[in-house]
Amino acid sequence: MERRRFLKSLFAAAAAGLFGRPSRSPAAADAAAAGGVIDFYGHFSSLRVIDFLESHGGLRPHPFRRLFANTAELIDPGRRLALMEECGIDHSVLVPLPWLETAPAVWADPRRCLEAARLLNDDLAAVAASHPKRFSAVAVLPTPNREVLLEEFRRALDELGMVGGLFVTGPTVKRPDHPDLEALYAEAARRDVPLWIHPSRPPSVADYLDEPESRYQIWQTLSWLQDSSAAMVRIVFAGVFLRHPGLKLVIHHHGALVPLFAQRMQYGWDYFEQNTGMRQPTPIRPPYIEHFRNFYCDTATQGTAPPLIEMAVSFFGAERVLFGSDAPMDASGGRHFTRDALASVGRAGLRAEEKEKILRRNALRLLKRAEIPGKG
């Protein structure tokens, strides 16, 4: 879908009142009612890791403490299961919070960072093991150096039975084409397990040089999309997919800005190369935008926005879009985000088989499961 068509459909949806809090669409609601939806990108955590980061990171309180303490569905398995039952989610892949880089003193110390990662991963793995039909767990990855990164990634897969790893991206952490992450990409590709990518820009990074910090939550509402998109650019132009063609990288927030601005990006590269004579310093061949289709993305629209799902499917293909809610990170403990994502998929102009892939089949393929047993 071209950008102009997307904007036209977006405005039409707004005029029709589709961006409020409508009931779920019949297609998505039916799939949920039948117990058929796998949420591939929701969050879970433990207050034990917050305690650790406060004790060893010089943070009292940790900036996420109140957020976590006031979101029971994020830290209480029983409350999370109740949310899933209420919204019709059969299985949730638990993606960890917080990222360890939120405590710079811990992140800078490989030993302490590894301890924090082990603590959180042990807790998430225990939740998944206690409800294997309802949960799978993703490992938080310590990134101070290559050794601790690979040590914990391997332990999470081999000893804890976790399904992949999470690393974050933004201006205060390691760039996604850093050599340490190259080793992670190689290991993930070799073992055929996904890696989840999450933006991590903190409010302390100002929007303008004459201010001490970001204002009006620009750092999260807008800059996170920019940071995820920038990470995709660095990964693609570094040739990561050339070296690891089977690598599975999952980008948050429906592919961020890339599906919307794909044509603009390619026009920009073409124009500057044609008129400056300077080719981008990259091993990949043009058209560069084609390489971005190697990513996977979720459906976390954070609002009922079918055009965003249509755009993601048009760009990545239905085989690379996975239902993800970003629950429970909203004021309703995840109910708004989950229902919004279901409605966005259900109301998108997609074929039934495409919706089935997004809601369930793609997740089963990446999790290497023929099926997930019934609830229990």
Image (cartoon, helix red, strand yellow):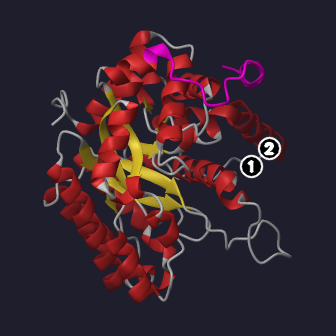
Q: Residue at x 56, y 29 (%)?
A: 312
Disc 1, SS: loop
Q: Residue furthest top?
A: 351
Magenta region includes residue 11: yes
Q: Residue 14: where, in percent of width, then height?
A: 74, 25
Contact, CB < 8 Å: mark 2 with mark 1? yes
Please state which of residues 284 and 324 is positioned toward the viewer in this rendering: 324
Nearest the camera: 124 or 107?
124
Residue 134 visible, this orientation:
yes
Q: Is residue 44 visible?
A: no
Q: Which residues are magenta?
A: 1-27
Quadrant of image for the C terminus: top left
Residue 175 drawn at (x, y percent): 54, 64
SS of the residue at dot 2? helix
| Residue 134 point in image, percent of width and height | 23, 40
**Is residue 163 on the magenta stretch?**
no
Q: Is residue 22 above or below residue 232?
A: above
Q: Which mark is residue 272?
A: 2
Any mark on residue 14, and which? Answer: none
Amino acid residing under circle 2? Phe
Q: Is residue 300 above or below residue 331?
A: above
Q: Position of residue 80 (x, y in %)?
A: 34, 48
Q: Residue at x 14, y 58 (%)?
A: 158
Q: Pointer 1: what residue?
A: 278
